[in-house]
Amino acid sequence: MSMITEKEALGRVAFYCSAAEHCRSEIDDKLKKWGLEADVIERILARLEAEKYIDSERYCRAFVDDKLRFSKWGKVKIAQALYLKKIPLETASKYLNDIDEEEYLATLSHLLISKRRTIRAKDDYDLKAKLIRFAMSRGFEMKYIIRCVNLPEADE
């Protein structure tokens, strides 16, 4: 992209941020792609934060909610995605810990019930192993997976 002025860049990213929630690192990456200087990028980011176009708390709350409800991700996968988006650990932990345990278990149960219909397994053990691997790939913790797959904790 050709050189863009600071004012044009600010206008574009402000519009971009007003359309949907975005985190600081996403906007930073976008501004770097546009070839802006580091000091210009920092000024734009500071202004967007001051004017509440970017808010990591608000972004984190929305991200956690969306990934749990719509993408059916577990806490581990959500935490990893937030880390990659450079969301502070304290912020991420706060919203991950706010997830209602009943809602979390219900999400996992529904996910496993629908997956169970599509799995071909030799026996019950093979079925449970495949369900556990699937749930772990979605970022759910073993303690919740075991409760939902109905495996005794000490099962070999």
Image (tube, rainbow, N blue to C red):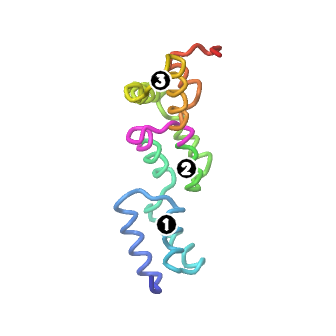
**Which image quadrant: the N terminus?**
bottom left
Name the residue carrying label 1. 27
- The answer to whether residue 69 is magenta is yes
| Residue in view at x 43 percent, y 81 percent | 7
Of badges 1 and 3, the one in the foreground is 3
How dense is the environment of label 1, judged by Cα within 10 Å: few (below 14), some, or many (20 and up)?
Answer: many
For badge 2, the amino acid type reads: Leu
Of badges 2 and 3, the one in the foreground is 3
Report the disc number at residue 82: 2
For badge 3, the amino acid type reads: Ala
84 displayed left or right of 112: right
For badge 1, the amino acid type reads: Ile
How dense is the environment of label 3, judged by Cα within 10 Å: few (below 14), some, or many (20 and up)?
Answer: few
| Residue in view at x 62 percent, y 14 percent | 155
Q: Gap between marks 1 and 3, in whole Å?
A: 46 Å
Of pointers 2 and 3, the one earlier in the residue sequence? 2
Name the residue carrying label 3. 121
Residue 75's place in the image compared with 27, above or below, is above
Provide residue 73's location: percent of width, then percent of height. Answer: 47, 39
Report the disc number at residue 148: none
| Residue in view at x 44 percent, y 75 percent | 10
**Which residues are drawn in magenta?**
66-77
Asked whether 35 or 42 is in front, the reply is 35
Residue 84's place in the image compared with 156, above or below, is below
Of pointers 2 and 1, the one earlier in the residue sequence? 1
